Image (cartoon, coloured by chain):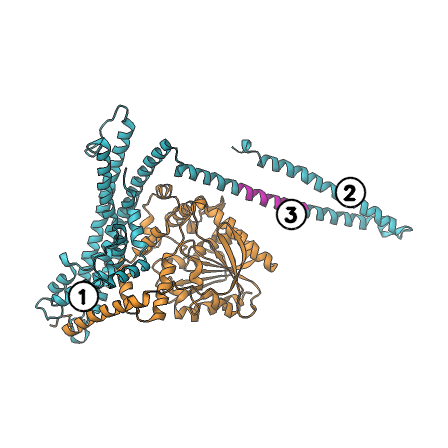
Chain colours: A cyan, B orange
Amino acid sequence: MADPANDFIRDYQALAQQSWDAWTRQLQQQQSQPAGSPFFTPPTAPASGNDTLERTLAGLKGYFDWMQGAAAGGAAAAPADWRQQVQQLFGGASQPFAQAFSGIDSAGAEGFARQWQSWMQAVQHSGFGDLPGAHGPTPAFGLNREQQMQQQAMSAAVLASLQASARYQALIQRANTQGMARLQGKLAQHAEPDRQIDSLKALYDLWVDSAEEAYAEIALSDEFREAYGEMVNTQMHVRQLQQQQTEQMCQQLGVPTRSEVSSLGERLQALRREFRAGQTSATNDHADEIMALRRELAALKRQLASTPAAAAPSAKPVASAKTRASAAAKVVSKAPAAALRKKAVVSKSRNSPSKRK
Amino acid sequence: MHTPLRIDPTKALGDIATFQRKLAAGMGHLRGMREPEYANTPRKLVYSEDKLKVWHFEGHSRPTAKTPLLIVYALVNTVWMTDLQADRSMVRNLLEQGEDVYLIDWGYPDGADRWLTLDDYINGYLDRCVDVVCQRHGLDAINLLGICQGGAFSLSYTALHADKVKNLITMVTPVDFHTPDNMLSHWCRNMDVDLFVDTMGNIPAGLMNYVYLTLKPVRLNQQKYIGMVDILDNPTELENFLRMERWIFDSPDQAGEAFRQFIKDFYQGNKLVKGTLEIGGKLVDLGMVTHPVLNIFAEQDHLVPPDASRAMGKHVGTTDYTQLAFKGGHIGIYVSGRAQREVPPAIHQWLSARD
């Protein structure tokens, strides 16, 4: 089985759910340690906690390391070739801002690399030997045919995902390189004595502007769009296959599966919609009935008003009024009865599940 | 020829020492600090259904507006951006202007809400919320204020239920999802959304936040926190910063089916402006929006590009269309000092003329 803890989704979660509480706790722990660096001593907490904490601190640590490196590397000295100096400050192996991009963007690839390794180990330990399908599709047969086919599909999916992630990473790296070129272009405009960059922070801010501009340009390209879509789709495919294998195992163990729960949810929501629609329909029916009754009543009133009896003086006006009211009531009383019968039929059909399907 | 870098070594070392000192001092400020509260403007629960709540806000004085205003927020993030803190609360400012303000709090969807569709949200939840406010005031129609995705919902709702809306206000609302500078739309165009939702179910808030961070990875993931170090010794600013962090990351998951439809129909299909959007089997015709419309957008919005909002003017059927460009970003339009001075008064003034 693949280790779902190490996939792309978990990876982003570890990053994005950074907790300042964790930072605070860690800083509290570090305060009591006589370590050389009071801020960025590698944490001694369990591995998962470390991972989250390191990611939380990665941005600040990158900046701090870069400032130290820049100061020690002679950023303040007047160089013969400033472009080379900038290249050393921001590029190559000492690239101080890798965390800003890699903290987010290469996390997916790293996560999947780990996932791939753990999955491979799990498969080998489970007695499958060499990875099925890792060297191309192989016809399967026998009692374990289905499992072999599934493992082949998983191998192909993971490989596709790794390739997609690598393609995406290449674009991120390109954005980084182009950001450097933009920085040099911007710096060239600061060569005048009154426009020179005079602090590490100002240099950093200029780099951020350059890096973001380069990234935005690439991120809006068709190439990036395709790579992004491919990365997401291939990773979802791996996850889907993992879920299928998990479900099969759960079914064998008699454990309810996510798809079963999901199906129940879908049916429940459909019933709720049906119920709401029924309520609305009933309300509308009532409104229609009331309107019809009002129209009938108005018509009756007009009719009575236009009859000669109503127009002429009556010897028994009270009795006449009673008669009219009684006649009107008889007419009116028919409508609700009819409507109720109609409503009962509607209600019956709605409550009959066998007729719904 | 001069070099562009003239960094004094002593100053550079001083900067490093200052950074280190501020970070160390910041530990003391952070330790024991309580989670910052939102503004919590006094409010009363007037309706609830599933995880949804409708709040009625209470100002210091009685509203002068005759028609109540219902705020329809997006499903992403929480509604408390509109009432973030006492001196940065759009709700509070609207109350002070004399508006009678209601707010839909969508809540935090879980697995039970996986199958909620846009029809359920717009023709179901939203429609019933409008009915509740109408009944409370004995009115046939009320004012709607839709924000971001909630603006797209409000626009669609107004087209579908024209007789229940008196005036429509939209803020940072995407209408044309295919403008060339729309990065989110660009990224999801090649996504297999069916595979995505079928696999993920509800879309985790963490994933949404992750994607938002990658819109400006260095600025949002590093530069912002370096800036935070400068305010670690300022309790008020630090509290404000952490309150915003709370709002950004304490966000709800997205109901799977609604997410699927929103991505396919709005982001990928751009059906709202194409006139082919259907919600609950009914065509959403923006030409039916003949109501007065006030469309407010942010000029530096990196989530909803201004052109995506401006497009509304070309598609709605109204002859009373007002557009307001705000100098700021997607969040600043609610919480910046400029926003407090400009946005609620503009909304109130516009509504007053149509009350």
On the question of residue A113 being in view, the answer is yes
State the predominant SS element of the stretch in magenta. helix
Q: Place residue A201 in its image quadrant.
A: bottom left
Compared with residue B335, is residue A309 higher up or lower down, i.e. above or below? above
Mark 3 or mark 2: name the one nearer the start of the chain: 3
Q: CA distance from mark 3 to mark 1?
A: 74 Å
In this view of the protein, which residue sits in the foreground, B6 or A129?
A129
Q: CA distance from mark 3 to mark 2?
A: 20 Å
Query: In the displayed structure, does residue A121 sit left or right of residue B339?
Result: left
In the rendered image, which quarter contains the N terminus of chain A?
A: top left
Mark 1 nearby-residue class (10 Å; few <14, some 14–19, many ≥20): many
Whether the magenta-drawn stretch holds residue A282 is answered as: yes
Q: Position of residue B96 (x, y in %)?
A: 50, 70
Which label is found at residue A67?
1
Q: Are marks 3 and 2 on the same chain?
A: yes
Rendered residue at 22%/50% (across/down): A169
> Disc 1 is attached to a residue of which chain?
A
Residue bearing the label numbered 3: A287
Q: Are marks 3 and 2 in contact (CB under 8 Å)?
A: no
Residue type at numbered disc 2: Lys
> Disc 3 is attached to a residue of which chain?
A
Residue type at numbered disc 3: Ala
Q: Position of residue B187 (x, y in %)?
A: 31, 50
Q: Are marks 2 and 1 in contact (CB under 8 Å)?
A: no
In this view of the protein, which residue sits in the foreground, B149 or A264?
A264
Residue type at numbered disc 1: Met
